[in-house]
Amino acid sequence: MGIRINVTSVFVDEQAKALAFYTERLGFLPKTDVPVGEFRWLTAVGPDEPDGTELLLEPDQHPAARAYKAALVADGIPAASFAVDDAAAAHAELTAKGVRFTQEPTVMGPVVTAILDDTCGNLIQLASPA
């Protein structure tokens, strides 16, 4: 069948702010930017995978989306997880860029994880092999 993930999304409070954070701080590359009424179909991709899975920066205008985001943050649960080569090195690099982390790099069995605040209403996990 060859099924695979093409697009996945995170709900964001402001698309322009989200695009700036995900590209300028995290290093994603802008991929698609199409006006859709009041909002945009706005995606980004990993710098090493320009044709890979797209991350849709989706407006959180639906009340359920806002409640979902708030509940996840209140419980410390990441909305998404991104792979990095070295979570500790990524933490150091991003901290130097002013990114705020809610969890320092932590060994969790076969992985090291760290959790950051994306400034758009989400917690995002970074994970690497231990």
Image: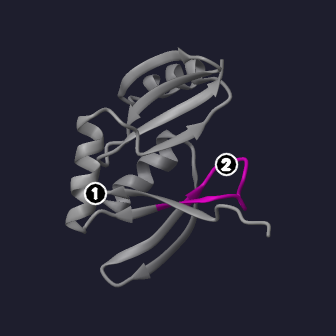
Rendered view: 123 above or below 41:
above
Q: Amino acid at mark 2?
A: Pro
**Residue 22 % position (x, y):** 47, 48
Q: Is residue 119 left or right of residue 29?
A: left
Task: Name the N-terminal-most of marks 1 and 2.
Answer: 1
> Is 17 a magenta residue?
no
Mark 1 → mark 2, Cα distance in angstroms: 24 Å
- Looking at the figure, which quarter contains the N terminus? bottom right
Q: Amino acid at mark 1?
A: Asp
> Is 46 a magenta residue?
yes
Evaluate if marks 1 and 2 touch, with contact meaning CB atoms under 8 Å apart: no
Who's the residue at 30% across and 42% down the image? 72
- Looking at the figure, which quarter contains the C terminus? top right
Name the quadrant containing residue 50: bottom right
Name the quadrant containing residue 90: top right
**Residue 129 % position (x, y):** 67, 23
Q: Could you classify mark 1 by the number of other residues whose Cα lies within 10 Å: few (under 14), some (14-19), or many (20 or more)?
A: some
Q: Which mark is residue 47?
A: 2
* Viewer-side label of 1, 2: 1
Magenta region, main secondary structure: loop
Closer to the camera, 25 or 58?
A: 58
Specify start and end residues of the magenta stretch as a single range.
44-56
Closer to the camera, 1 or 7?
A: 1
Which residue sits furthest front? Answer: 1
Name the quadrant containing residue 79: top left
Q: Could you classify mark 2 by the number of other residues whose Cα lies within 10 Å: few (under 14), some (14-19), or many (20 or more)?
A: some
Who's the residue at 41% across and 74% down the image? 40
Who's the residue at 56% across and 40% down the image? 82
**Residue 54 % position (x, y):** 59, 61
Residue holding disc 1: 13
